[in-house]
Every structure is written in structure tokens, then in C-alpha cells.
Image (cartoon, rainbow, N blue to C red):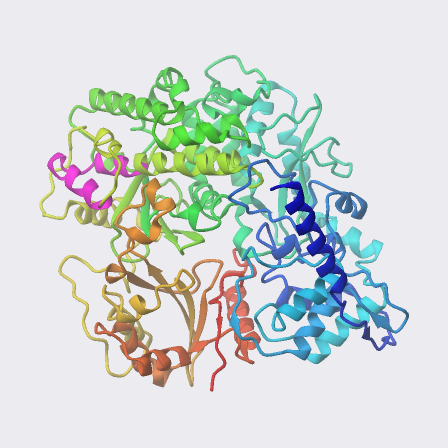
Amino acid sequence: MSANNLFLYTLLYLLLTACAVPPPPLHVQIPDHSIDYLREIKPILDKRCVVCHSCYNSPCQLKLSSYEGLDRGASKEAVYNAQRLKTMDPSRLFFDAQSTEEWRAKGFHTVTENKAEPGFNDSILLQLLAHKMDHPESSGTYQPEAEDLTCAEDGAELGSYLDKHPNRGMPFGFPPLQEEEFQLIAGWLAQGGKGPTPAQQQKLITPKLADQREINRWESFLNRTDPKHRMTARYLYEHYFLAHIKFGTATDEYYELVRSRTAPGKPVDIIATVRPYDDPETDTFFYRFRKIHSTIVHKTHMVVHFDRWMLARFQELFIRPQWQEEPHEVDYDVHLSANPFIAFEQIPPVSRYRFLLDNAHYIIMTFIRGPVCRGQVALNVIHDHFWVMFLDPKYDLSVKFPGFLRMNQENLVMPIERGSQFPISRLLNHVIHNNKYHQASLRYLRSRQDFYTANYDEGLGYNAIWKGERSADAPLLTVYRHFDSASVHRGVLGGLPRTLWVIDYPLLERIYYSLVAGFDVYGTLGHQTSVRLYMDKLRREGELGFLNFMPLEKREEMQSAWYIGAEDTQVDAMAPFMPAAISFTSDDPKREFIEHIVTKEIPASAGIGFDPINYLKDDGRYNQGPAHLETDQDILRGFRSVTGPNSALLSYFNSYNANLAFVRIERENRKDACFTLVVNRWHDNVSYYAMILEKRVLNASKDRMDILPGFVGSYPNYFFKIHEKDLPDFLALLSAKEQVSEEEVDRFVRYGINRADPQFWQEYDWFQQRFFEEQPVEAGLFDLNRYYPLARIRE
């Protein structure tokens, strides 16, 4: 841009800003009592504001799940920025700054400050809430995560924004607060918008006595000074840094494991590194538990139970066994610490793998629900629905022969070793397969295939699949992609998926380190894309792990069906060639394999069985549902009738915001039922070309839908409320195979709860309360940022 053009643009901006008129200050009736933030204000924010303003994807980084976040305020800089060429300074609440002044220095501005005269208020927060009260109807489309939102820093910017967008008050694209809620917040702001009292704050951050006893026990274990305990604690911390830890007590509180400069017994002084394996830059630090006092939101609520069994298990896995070498501490050299196969080489691989299997659900969940998996580009590396199994440690050669890992250390390197500033030039090489990470992954895979073929010259059988050791284990997992979010569930949910994975120790560890521990949400385009492309290799490795169990003559055909139209010459190069040990008796070995595993190998105590609604056995048919849906069994049969392919409605509603819906069935004399509709979009392939050209690999005629009891996912796209007498009509609309008419579309939409519906919040509250009732430990607030964007006022 020339100097003249820059001057003109700057002048135009200044003129427009000067012409912008701030909204007039609002008259506020000063309350006659002191409003308590925790008792009176926080419940309103939780119910109506935190549902969009939490975590990294909070619009304007305004995180309202705690007073600290509200006080921090908003920022114009977006955390999720796929075009970022320089790393962004981290802005993690409770980590990267500890005071209001520090946050202001990082560019955050207040939303609660009032500069008006007494009796009036001009804070940004109240102005946005009041604007919605004055303009309650929503019209048009609303995408809170869109890049065109204005994060107004002052009254002039806010006035310009609201003049341009008169329907964008808060809550954004939803009905306004109730009058009494608004007045309560207005009164609180008029009183200075104060947070918890010192006594209340101390209670918020202080563990209950029962939890403190457990904390003392755990911190004693994690902070022993001998090298064996120190390296064990380091390994555990690097895997649990995202966990919401619940101790084996009767409390309802959760904790996070952090590194602190201060010893147990003193207030935590957080060491705020970007990654858990980054150098703490101090010789003396401690592993500590910090109480989580923010509102729990489901998308980040990944619970791990630290009970007596877990402590004994860590002793069994890490402390009692003899290690590969004399235990010694390893430094935090960036290239070493970014490769767990080097950093933790001294810990027996069998111990590491059994630890990961104990935590299989959590480990996969961190990838599926962690910061890496936000948005289409991050998630189109996986199919919309697949099942995951694990190789039994007794058959995992990397566990049986640790020298194999040592021999392949250089082939197991990951792009994360280059940190957050992955160069664009190397990224281009990454795409055209001319870089060390792609070549290393191919070398490792060929080495693995050769090693397994040599050791299992007759192939692997059913006994090579891990069955779990406890009833609480997760030997089988279901992963759903919901376009720009995803979820993982214990067991085999849904119909038979196109792809299945079998994961071994090196693959599971690399999935975790490349996509979770090593991923920097504040990193550059190069870093984030290199991680996405590397995951493409890891996904294929999991798929090939499954293909190794299939008949040799079927493997190429099956793999080709997963990569229809893929312009990738490397598919054939990664084809498995190990012999097959299983003698299949049907023409559908994939189905025969998984049905044998589920019905004959997994212990009954695990409680894992096929989905009674969506899984159709080989001889099953999608029968027409019953005419009257009176019993629970009738409802299940009715749902089964609509789970087949070729639904005309699914083809009609093929938007990326139409993939996950919660359904409430109102019943006269029984408790209302609740189900989730999960749409599985067909992709011809999910190779890295689909990252940019996803629309070209979609085929709406092959989309399918799973209907599951309860709740699936963190980001509902729509709510439906259907009276039981209307359920046959609703199911008939879903099962229609011919092109749907406008009248049928309108009829279907009328069963839904649009974001413009005046009763929206009542319906949302029902679903949220039901979730807490059904899953009191695992539940958290749903996120409404991705609710269907079109506001449609019912006539």
C-alpha cells in the first residue's frame, strides 16, 4: 500500500470514528440493597451468557464463566486465526496474567466500567443488554464466531456498530433477558459491578477438607525428589494438564494439575508455559492441584478420577517395575521434550502403553474436544463416524521389543518439534511430500509393517485386540464429527461405520503429543496446518492397523472405498501386506470382525453392546415404524425406521450448522424422553486435499442419521420439541425418500425451536437441566455458538 493510500485510509477511519455517536447513558434505578455477585448475578450470566462466552472461542475473548473473566474484559484479537503468520501472545485466563492491570497491558478492555454521572450507566455490557431489550426480535443470520464481529472498545465504536446492526444486542441472536434479570444486572453495575467479597473469593479457591486430604496425598506422591518419581510425575503431568480431576470424595469440585514455583502448602504460583513439556525455566518447581472455580462448560470438561485405585495403579505401572535404564532426570531441550519416545525412553513402554489404555477415553477425548479440534479445517481430517479399537499390549511389538522404538526414534519425530512458528516454506514442502516429517512417517510405517510381518508370519487374530482389564475400561470408542466440533463416546454407537481404527502404543502417543500436548492454538498458519497434515498420516496409520486384520485380497478394495477420488499417490505405498490370521466365513469381513469382537471377546461386565436403534445386522432391514408410538420400545422401533440412507430432509438441510439436534418428546403420563439426532455426512475421502475443497468430496445422497438416547456433543445445532401424538408425523418427515415439498419443510421446522422463538430460553433450560440430571459428573453447560444461524419468527 502506498503512503498516499495509507494516509487516505487513516483519514477516512478517523472521520468515520469522529462521526460515530455513542449510545446515550442509561438511566438506572439504584437498588436499595447491595447486590451479591455470586448469588444474584453469576446465575444469570451462567444461564444466558456463558453459553456463548467461554473458552477460546468466546466472541471478543470475553469469557464470562468467572468474575476474573468478566473483569478482564474483551479483546479485538481473535484466538482462532487460521491465517496468522506470527505467533500470538497467549491470553489464557488464570495463566498468562494475574491482575486487571496485566490484562490491560495485553490489550484487553473493560466492558463494565461506567463513566456516566450518578444515576446513569454507559458500560459496554449494559448498553448491549439494553439494546437487546429495546430490539428483542432477531432477524437474519447470527454466527457469533464469525470474523466480522466488532469488539467495541468504547462508546463511539459501540454506537457505530449498533447503528449498522440494530439486531445485534446481547444475547446475540437470541431472546433478551427477562426484565427482572436486566434490572438486577443494571443495578449491580450501578453499584460498581463488584465481584465476590474477599471471604467469598477465598472460599471459591479453597478446596473442601475431604479434597484437601486427597490433595496432600497426591502432591506428596508427585513431588518426591528421586528421579523415578520426578520422571513419572512429569509424564503424568504432560498427559493430564487438560484434565478436570475429581478426587474419590463426595464433593462436586474439580481440580487442574499445574506446575508451580511454590511448594505444597503455599498458594500456587503458576508456571505458564505454552506447552506442558516446555522448559519451566527454574530448577525447582512443584506439581500442584488448583481448584477450578469457573463455571463448568461441557466442551472442556474432561473428567479424570484420581482415587485410591489410580494411585495404586501408578505405583504398579511406574514405580515398582525396573526401568530400561537407571532412572535419571531429562532436561527440557525442545527437540528432546517434543518427542516422548526420547524424553521418556527410560520408562518401560509397557507401562506407558497400559497407562494410556487405562485412560483411553480421556486421551482420545483430548484430541477430539481439545483446542486443536475447532472448526472445519481442523476436523475434516476425520470421517463423520468411526470406531476405535486398541492393540493388546501383549501383541504390540513396540512394547514387547523396546529396541524397535529406539531404532525408529528419528522416524517418530513430529512437526511440533519446530514449535509454534512452523515456516511457510516448509509447509509448502509438507504438502508436496518433500519434507522430513512425511518421509519419516513413511519410513516408520514401512519399518513397522516389516517388523510385524516378520514376527507374525501368520497374521494377527482376534486375541490381538485389547479387551480391557476393568469394567470401567474403554476398549471400544465411537467418534462423531459434527462438522466443526466432535465428540467421543465409550462403546460402539450408531450403525456400522465405513472405517475403523486399531491403535497401538506409538500411534496413540503421537496422536496425543502432536494434537494435544504439542498443539499451540496461538501458533501460526504453518504450525496449525502442519499438525493437521500430520494427523492425515496418523489417521491412515489407524485405518491400516485395522486393515491388517482383514483378508489380504480385500484390503486394497476396502482402502480404495475410503479414498474415492483421492489425488494421493501415497495411498498404495501405505497399503498393508501382513498375512491375515482370521478365516472369515462371510463376504463382509469388517462386519464379521467387529461383531465377533463385541459379542464374543469383550467381557459382559464392560456393558458394551451394539446400538439397538441404529445398528443393523447383516440380515436386518429398515422396516416401517409402528403406527402408534405408545411404549419406549415403539419409539425405538420408530426411530430405527428413519436411520437408513437417502433421507430427503437431510439432503435439504445440508448446511454445516445442521448436524446435531436435541429432541424432547413430551409425554402425558410419563417423564419426557430425550434423544440426539446425529447427522453423518458422507465424504468420498478425507485426505488433506479435502481441507480446502471439502464440498467436492461430500455426497448428500449418502448422508445418514443416528438417533441416540440422551445427549451427544457439546454444540447443539437445534432443539426439537414434539408431543408424543405428533411423533409419527415427525418420523415420517425424516424418513421421506422423495424430494420434500415446502409444506413438508415448514411442517418439520415448526417442530423445532428457532433462535428467534420467544420461548427459546425456557426450552434451552429444560435440555440443560436434563443433562445435569442424567450425567451429574460429566455434564457441563452446552455451547450455543453454533446454533442454527437463521432467525425465523414463527407465524
How would you classify the magenta stretch by its main secondary structure?
helix
- Estimate the x, y position of residue 172 in percent, counting from the top left: 60, 67
Q: Specify whether 302 is left or right of 511.
A: right
Quadrant (top left/top right/bottom left/bottom right) for the N terminus? top right
Q: Specify whether 101 is left or right of 665.
A: right
Q: Which residue lies at the image location 30% right of the left edge and 71% below the top edge?
A: 649
Q: Which residue lies at the image location 66% right of the left edge and 57% below the top edge?
A: 151
Q: Viewer-proximal residue, 454 or 377?
A: 377
Query: In the figure, 448 relative to 647: above or below?
Result: above
**Snapshot quadrant of residue 94:** top right
- Estimate the x, y position of residue 789 in percent, counting from the top left: 49, 67
Q: Is residue 370 magenta?
A: no
Q: Which residue lies at the image location 56% right of the left edge and 75% below the top edge?
A: 138
- Estimate the x, y position of residue 591 in percent, counting from the top left: 19, 49
- Name the residue at the top extreme: 326
Confirm whether residue 72 shows in the render. Answer: yes
Total residue callouts: 0
- Name the residue at the front extreme: 4
Q: Which residue lies at the image location 27% right of the left edge and 74% below the top edge?
A: 638
Query: In the figure, 643 relative to 232: above or below?
Result: below
Confirm whether residue 170 shows in the render. Answer: no
Q: Specify whether 117 is left or right of 552.
A: right
Provide the residue span drawn in magenta.
542-564
